[in-house]
Image (cartoon, rainbow, N blue to C red):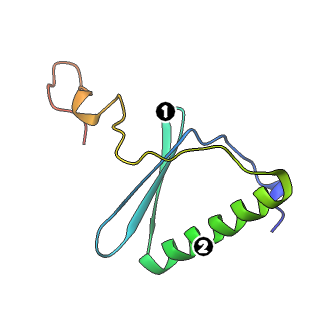
Amino acid sequence: MDFDAIPKQFCENVAAGHTREHFVLIMSVGNNAAAYALTPQHMKRVVQSLTHQLGEYERQFGSIDAKWSPGIESPLQTKDLKGEEGDPEPPR
């Protein structure tokens, strides 16, 4: 696969969640988002692949200064969204 030939968008946010049966990755670009469901085994391979790619990047270009802070709540929550005009319930 030629990665240079694939159209790209800058992903602004990634969220993940899981149930016993699957993981869900949500990737957002502006007001658009795509959700991907993965088996636990596939998720593990995705994490392994990303870890490998990150290690290769840092070997070539140096350490990346970044901190992951789990549990930080987004300033915009679905409970804050309003549905159709006059509808107090958030969209589902």
**Residue 13, image x and y in percent?**
52, 42
**Image quarter (top left, top right, bottom left or bottom right) of the N terminus:** bottom right
Question: Disc 1 marks which residue?
Answer: 31
Question: Disc 2 marks which residue?
Answer: 48
Please, is residue 38 above or below residue 74 in the view?
below
- Camera-nearest residue between 45 and 5: 45
SS label for mark 1: loop
Identity of the residue drawn at 16% across and 25% down: 87
Q: Is residue 79 left or right of residue 40?
A: left
The answer to whether residue 66 is visible is yes
Q: Nearer the viewer, mark 1 or mark 2?
A: 2
Type of residue at label 2?
Gln
**Image quarter (top left, top right, bottom left or bottom right) of the C terminus:** top left
Query: N-terminal of the two: label 1 or label 2?
Result: 1
Alpha-carbon neighbours of circle 1 within 10 Å: few (<14), some, or many (≥20)?
few
Q: Is residue 45 left or right of residue 70?
A: right
Identity of the residue drawn at 60% across and 44% down: 66
- Camera-nearest residue between 26 and 5: 26
